[in-house]
Image: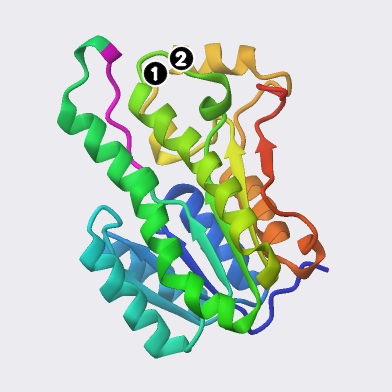
Amino acid sequence: MFRLKDKIAVVTGASQGIGRDTARALAEAGAKVAVAARNEEKLAELVQEITGKGGEALAVKMDVADGEQIKAGFKSIFEKFAKVDILVNNAAITRDGLAMRMKPDDWEAVLRTNLTGAHLCIQQVLGPMMKARSGRIINISSVVAESGNAGQANYVASKAGLIGLTKAIAIEIASRNITVNAIAPGFIETPMTAVLPDKVKEELKERIPLGRLGSGREIAAAIVFLASEEAGYITGHVLDVNGGMYLA
């Protein structure tokens, strides 16, 4: 169940955190994985880890805030694998600050990476997926896209925008047997949350009914499911993986 043998997957933001765990999980399920991010050293380590376990992986240096890097990156992916079956839009940044003081550059940087970057990556795979009449696109949103969060107007807007993008494209391409879904993780143990003070982490846990932060592996497992044939009748959906923190 949930096998992805010989499928070609692309994961953005794959150098650490959820993206890294997702690449590992997809490879374990049998997919060949193109891992994209800005940090070439970390990508090389990840490729070595995957190939060392008998998988196949390609490192692609890509800043999704740069449209030309996206085009070049996907060109190299198609040259290597000839197709893309699964796209996981995971790359994201934060530039937190109160809305009344937020600098235009911080707003633009977050929207450009988290939302526009995902859109441009989707554009790179839509044509080939439509010709193949098959594909899985999975966008990584956030619990705060649904609940809101003070001090993160740019991040929340970008992640809420991903949900809207998911639903719009799901409707556009459903007739071609391509599904588009989003996952909204809660607070997950990642390098992004590792920098939080212990007091803040404890306060967060008190807001989570399951009483703990999630793991990247738990998000990756949800991604593998949505990428599988078993999830073929699910599209335009937002899957909450948040420990009960927000109940839609």
Magenta residues span 92-99
Looking at the rendered structure, the kind of residue marked 2 is Val
Q: Residue at x 56, y 55 (%)?
A: 169
Residue 122 at x, y = what percent? 45, 62
Q: Which mark is residue 36?
A: none
115 relative position to 216: left or right: left
Which residue in the structure is indicated by mark 1?
197
Secondary structure mostly taken by the magenta-highlighted segment of the chain: loop
19 relative position to 181: left or right: left
Residue 59, magenta (yes or no):
no
Residue 7 at x, y = what percent? 62, 79
- Between 133 and 58, the residue placed more toward the observer is 133
Residue 207 at x, y = what percent? 62, 14
Q: Quadrant of residue 137?
A: bottom right
Q: Badge 2: few (under 14), some or many (20 or more) residues near its Cα, within 10 Å?
A: few
- Between 115 and 89, the residue placed more toward the observer is 115
Q: Give the distance between the C-alpha atoms of the residues marked 2 and 1, in whole angstroms.
A: 5 Å
Q: Secondary structure at mark 2?
A: helix
| Viewer can see residue 52 | no
Q: Which mark is residue 200?
A: 2
